[in-house]
């Protein structure tokens, strides 16, 4: 832990924080400035852009400890800024915002464009905005808003903006002198090397020897099965049967302890289908195992890595408790869903559903026409079940 003090919108916030806490989390959780939005959390979408000592910074990939003693300005702190006083009404006039999720980051980048490029044309504006993604506007309104403000500020028509530009230029000169002069840029020629195939199996193989998934989230759960531990352990070695107990899972290939397949998920209008590969490592003596896998969504190209560890705990001669530990990481557009506070409840409910299906499939008197788990995991129906459980717990009627 490290004690830091950051001035957020002219208010100093001092906290003892983990060294790897991101600036975005510090601003939102400790500074309570929630106008800074988190999207991809990989520095790609630009929604989290804030100003650090006047310079635009991706707060989701900047460590808070690196900003100790610095001044951070978020969308809530632009009231006294001369450029923002022009940009905000311009965004409104030109319909440069719709849902508003990207707007805080867009404003920070747009301010930087007005500050550094007084004579920028549309092409340059689009290049500078390319690091900020918007799914609503098509960018035309945003570009027009920036061009509108640039036109208002030409020929030093707005003294306050001219003063900010002069100060920014001086800072750049000072930094260049301290650095010993700006280094030359070595040009290069782009070469087409052909399409690079992303094979989930290779990714899974690379992760097999990893002791932990970097930046992963760990969720624990358990379920009980009314059968002896040896019988449950034997069943859990049958990967096709196990996959048949998981809603949305489908195996396409099975060789020994390795499998390939897909997991389909539906969340309202959003659908995802992760194709991937996994390997099962079993410890017969301890009756424990780890399923290591990786996959990629064919639609959003989001990537997932996960380790599912489980072990058998004998309750009595005819009852077994299966303890499950899920360690996973999600990269890409779908990563934003991994932060939800409902995720743990959702996964816990999914583990319970899996346990019920294991019990049904192990039943020696099971009817052959017993309905199988759905071919697609419907997160909405499970989510409603989770919400109902929370409501019952809140009113003291749950477990």
Image: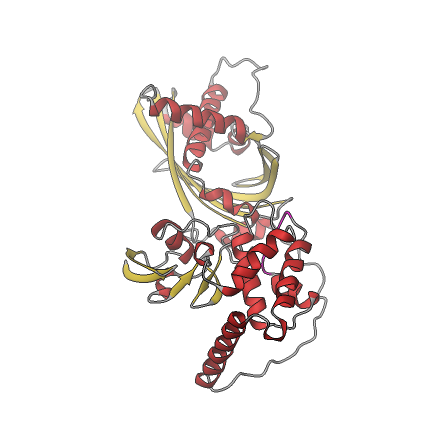
Residues rendered magenta in the picture: 131-136
Q: Residue at x 59, y 14 (%)?
A: 369
Q: Return the x and y of residue 108 as percentages of the image width and height.
A: 52, 61
Q: Is residue 305 above or below residue 186?
A: above
User: Can residue 252 be seen from the camera position used here?
Assistant: no
Residue 370 vs residue 217, the one in the foreground: 217
> Looking at the image, which is closer to me, 368 or 249?
249
Tell me where residue 291 appears, x and y as whole percent: 47, 41
Q: Is residue 134 magenta?
A: yes
Q: Residue at x 43, y 51 (%)?
A: 213
Q: Residue at x 58, y 67 (%)?
A: 113
265 and 134: which one is in front? 134
| Residue 204 within the magenta-colored segment of the rendering | no
Quarter of the picture holding the N terminus: bottom left
Whether residue 144 sits left or right of residue 156 in the image: it is right
| Residue 298 image point, x, y percent | 64, 44
Say if 330 sits above or below 234 in the image. below
Question: Is 330 on the left or on the right of 261, as rendered?
Answer: left
Residue 398 pos. (x, y %): 34, 21
For the point 57% across and 18% down, the residue is 371
């Amino acid at each position: 832990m490290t004690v830091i003090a950051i001035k957020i919108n002219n208010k100093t916030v001092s906290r003892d924080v983990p060294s790897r806490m991101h600036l975005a989390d510090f601003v939102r959780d400790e500074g309570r400035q929630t106008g800074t939005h988190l999207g991809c959390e990989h520095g790609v979408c630009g929604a989290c852009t804030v100003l650090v000592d006047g310079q635009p910074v991706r707060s989701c990939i900047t460590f808070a400890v690196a900003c100790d003693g610095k001044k951070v300005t978020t969308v809530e702190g632009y009231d006294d800024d001369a450029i923002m006083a022009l940009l905000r009404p311009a965004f409104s006039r030109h319909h440069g915002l719709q849902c508003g999720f990207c707007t805080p980051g867009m404003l920070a980048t747009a301010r930087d464009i007005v500050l550094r490029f007084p004579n920028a044309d549309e092409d340059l504006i689009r290049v500078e905005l390319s690091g900020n993604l918007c799914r609503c506007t098509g960018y035309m309104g945003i570009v027009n808003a920036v061009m509108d403000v640039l036109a208002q500020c030409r020929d030093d028509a707005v003294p306050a903006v001219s003063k900010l530009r002069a100060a920014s230029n001086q800072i750049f000169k000072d930094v260049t002198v301290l650095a010993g002069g700006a280094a030359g840029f070595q040009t290069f020629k782009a070469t087409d090397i052909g399409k690079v195939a992303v094979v989930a199996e290779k990714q899974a193989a690379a992760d097999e020897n990893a002791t932990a998934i970097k930046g992963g989230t760990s969720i624990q759960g358990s379920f009980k099965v009314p059968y002896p531990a040896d019988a449950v352990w034997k069943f859990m070695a049958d990967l096709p049967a196990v996959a048949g107990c998981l809603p949305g899972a489908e195996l396409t290939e099975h060789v020994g302890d390795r499998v390939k397949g897909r997991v389909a998920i539906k969340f309202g209008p959003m659908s995802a289908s992760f194709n991937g590969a996994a390997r099962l490592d079993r410890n017969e003596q301890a009756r424990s195992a780890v399923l290591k896998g990786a996959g990629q969504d064919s639609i959003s190209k989001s990537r997932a890595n996960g380790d599912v560890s489980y072990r058998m705990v004998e309750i009595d001669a005819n009852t077994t408790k299966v303890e499950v530990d899920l360690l996973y990481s999600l990269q890409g557009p779908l990563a934003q869903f991994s932060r939800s506070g409902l995720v743990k409840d959702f996964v816990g409910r999914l583990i319970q559903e899996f346990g019920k299906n294991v019990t049904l499939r192990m039943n020696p008197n099971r009817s052959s026409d017993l309905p199988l788990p759905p071919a697609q995991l419907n997160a909405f129906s499970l989510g409603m079940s989770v919400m109902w459980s929370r409501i019952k717990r809140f009113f003291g009627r749950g477990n």
